Amino acid sequence: MSHDHTPTVAPTYSIPVGPLHVALEEPMYFKIDVEGETVKHVGINAGHAHRGIEYLTTKRTIYQNVVLTERICSLCSNSHPQTFAMAAEKIAGIEVPERGIYLRVVADELKRIASHIFNVALLVHLTGYETYFMHMMQVREICQDTLESVFGNRQDIGAMCIGGVRYDVDEKSIAYILAQLARIEPEVRDFIKTFKSNGTILRRTKDVGVLTHANAITCGVVGPVARGSGIDYDVRREATYAAYDRLPLMVHTQTDGDVWSRAMVRLEETITSIDLVRVCLRDLPGGDAHIHDRPDIPPGQAIARTEAPRGEVFYYLRTNESAQPERVKWRVPTYMNWDALRFMLQDAKVADIAIIVNSIDPCLSCTER
Amino acid sequence: MNFLTLFARNLRTGPQTEAFPLGPAFTPEKLRGRIVFNAENCEGCRICERVCPAGAIKFAKSPDGMTFDCWHNTCVFCGNCEFYCPTDAIHQTNDWNLAHVQADKFAMVEHGLIPNMKCSDCGATALNTAPMVKNVKPPLSEAELGEVRSRCPKCRAKYLKNRKVPS
Ligand code: SF4
Ligand code: SF4
């Protein structure tokens, strides 16, 4: 009889998470080495969802591409065409009418409200507080109904065009949007209160997935992930565009860099977004919302960047004599943010992996396009 | 809000989901759905075909004139065609009821025809398109519009050039 005392379970082993991940419903594969319950090393394997959209943009005209870029990502679906249009407008020297730039902010911020509530609701879902998750999604539904009623679609709102916005608002729709915001705002304030007091949420999110300020800078993270780690950076303020320089934009930061901080940044930004829409609708200048012709975009190159709900979206556009662009390249926030997962997941508990991954609000459809 | 408050509220308000298909679904007036084409207003400029990102719109010559087809199974309901159409010949209705059985997949098409006509001036065969006269000043009267419409492109240009502008 042998006296083999080697334990039957090795103390370290690696587990696959993904490619169809619980938090994302998007394909991403993590190879996670654990020691007992604790994550020791994270290998990120991306590239499962390549759709060749960058190539496709060079097969379509600039005007068709406004629609194609909107379909890169469903939650940032307004930021992509807006940034693309900004780059094209820069090349052609197109000036967007005043009313157009205010309406661009309205569209952008309404989408931000929907996106932020969605992400924080998913976080609540992952903590297991299903009742509250349903409640948050129901509040988000008010925003989705608003998008559908004002723009004609819940996700691809089709607000942007080269030289302005495609939609316009009248007295009736302004009153409708304001009434909907008045329904959303108290609920979001209640989310904030709940996030500060609810034991279930606090226990699962405080001091979990910490990204220190120094590591945040190392990874070059953007958006709410950066602001949750105390980096006071928002493209809407740093490289202002549309009407943001005239609006009371507040940039929210937190210092702890944990899952809770990132969620709190998103919730506070939702309140700011509501305020921004209100101010825009109050100060809305008259006139046209878009230019009236379809000018050719001359040869040239330009970059543009905006603050999408997930952070900075960066576009590079090069045009030539043809109607199709020669090259379109974009850099999306998740590209930098997922790198930071290596730090956030270090020494985390296996049970927290989903919560931490969700906290960067990953979007793979745009990162892998 | 804590769990018990939410629970009590949900008991009071009942389910939030829509009763569809047993009841009507929320459909805003502006919903961008099924495409409708109105050949009467079409200028035949084919801008819609050019700006359509999906390639859903196809114009083609036929013995009777020019046909318009919009394939609803290709359309992404972006609304570019309606937005860039200089007249209101093409627009999106809020009808989203586009589910269909496999056998009907080639029937999900909005079809239209811009018919041929004989030019009232030179007698040549031409398309009976709506005249492109948006920028003509002063605007044409109803009678003049009819006059222009009945002509072929060449004669239309001639008519507009020779038009006596009342001062
Ligand atoms: S539907 Fe409109 S855009 Fe298309 S050809 Fe006719 S007038 Fe032109
Ligand atoms: S709605 Fe968009 S995809 Fe559909 S026919 Fe019009 S331009 Fe094409």
Image (cartoon, coloured by chain):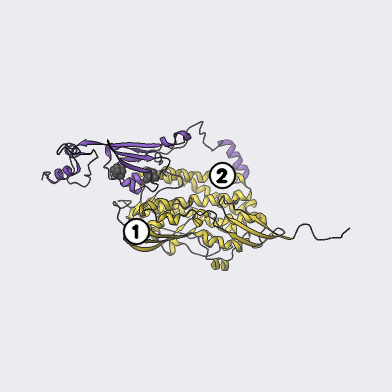
Chain B shade in the render: purple
Sequence-first tag of 2 and 1: 1
Tell me the crowding category of disc 2: few under 14, some 14 to 19, or many 20 or more residues within 10 angstroms, Cα based.
Answer: some
Colour yellow belongs to chain: A
Q: Return the chain for callout 1.
A: A
The residue under label 2 is A135
* x and y, in percent, of residue B126 in the image: 22, 39
Q: Give the camera-side residue of B82 and A356.
A: B82
Is disc 2 placed on a helix, strand or loop?
helix
Q: Please say whether residue B8 is visible from this viewpoint.
A: yes
Q: Is residue B37 above or below residue A333?
A: above
Q: Is residue B99 left or right of residue A359?
A: left
* x and y, in percent, of residue A207 in the image: 63, 60
Q: Return the chain for callout 2.
A: A
Q: Please say whether residue A277 is visible from this viewpoint.
A: no
Q: Nearer the viewer, mark 2 or mark 1?
A: 1
CA–CA distance in space, label 2 to label 1: 41 Å
Q: Is residue A262 above or below residue B167?
A: below
The dot on residue A89 is 1
Q: Is residue B120 above or below residue A365?
A: above
Q: Is residue B76 left or right of residue A39?
A: left
Q: Is residue A135 left or right of residue A177?
A: right
Q: Quadrant of the C terminus of chain B?
A: top left
Query: Label 1 is placed on what type of residue?
Result: Glu
Q: Is residue B38 above or below residue B53?
A: above
* x and y, in percent, of residue A37 in the image: 70, 58
Q: Give the camera-side residue of B37 and B101.
A: B101
* x and y, in percent, of residue A285 in the image: 33, 52
Tell if the residue under mark 2 belongs to the same chain as the one under mark 1. yes
Q: Residue furthest front?
A: B63
Q: Residue at image x 48%, y 64%?
A: A233
